[in-house]
Image (cartoon, rainbow, N blue to C red):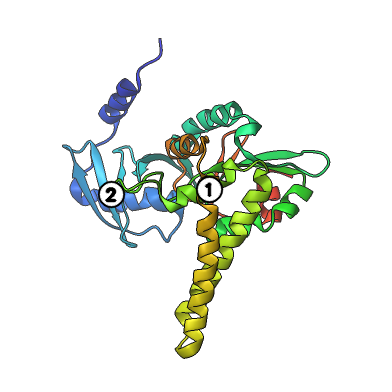
Amino acid sequence: MKKSLLALVTSALISAPVWAADDLKPKVQSAMQSALGPRAVVTEVVPLAEGQIYEVMMADGSVMHMTPDMKHVVVDGAIYRLGAGQVTNISDTRMQARRAAEMAAIPDKDTVLFKADGEEKAVVNVFTDIDCGYCQKLHNEIEDINALGITVRYLAYPRAGINEQDGSGTTESYRKINYVWCQEDRTAAMTEMKSLQGELSQLYRGARSATGPSQKQAIERFDSKYEEMSELLGDKASCETPVAAQFNLGRAIGVRGTPAMVTTDGQLIPGYLEASKLAERLGL
């Protein structure tokens, strides 16, 4: 009969040595540096909950919590196992199987699909947002990614959320990506919307840096392009889509920003990777 997690944790805590306060700092630092290297400098260790857990303060200002056996730390809600020269994210390993199952349950028809050229060697699910600069950068390489035999399945993750906090309606971030899912040709709409947002961002930066008469012209160009975007976000962006469900799924499986890529076996790859690096990460 398998022990419950609570029982296992309790057993580990009971069997763990309890060090004197003066001994804690060097022993904790030794454990940290064994896993992370000499740059892991501990400034203070404070036993909490009658010594059942240690609060560890690092020289870079970060704070984590360590089990008394000094084999595990908790950082931002995730549990990591410390080993010789390595750190294993136990929480992510547990989540990996769930991610794989969730990705397999999403049909292609609910995604924006950019299929691999020729033989499909890998599939990657990419949670994306229209406003995200690195999402635009990744999309600019979509042809290169497909040419490497990688199919991209875009899932929606409007970073500003679905609804405005004041209850005034949906966020612009949601309407932009919902527009894509509302179009008959989603691949063309995704490219159109990311390209348009990229132009808007460039015009905005130009308007902020310009001065005098040139600033007025830059603002006028920005306003004209923004009006073009606003026209798209009318009725054409209003239809029933899986965008909200995908956003909520992303949060549930650990997506915290965009782009965030999830492999078919459930690995989460946060952030942008250029096409060749992505292929390397996928083992191609």
Q: Which residue is label 1 attached to?
A: 177
Residue 149 falls left or right of residue 88:
right
The residue beneath circle 2 is 166
Question: Does any portion of residue 76 appear in the rendered image?
Answer: yes
Secondary element at tag 1 = helix
Give the residue drawn at x 28%, y 38%.
Answer: 68
Give the residue drawn at x 51%, y 86%.
Answer: 214
Furthest residue in direction left, as rendered: 50
In the image shown, does 110 or 234 lie closer to the viewer?
234
For the view shown, which residue lies furthest in the bottom direction? 212
Q: How many marks?
A: 2
Image quarter of residue 199? bottom right
Closest to the observer: 63 or 129?
A: 129
Q: Name which residue type carries label 2.
A: Asp
264 versus 258 height, above or below:
above
Q: Position of residue 251 (x, y in %)?
A: 43, 39
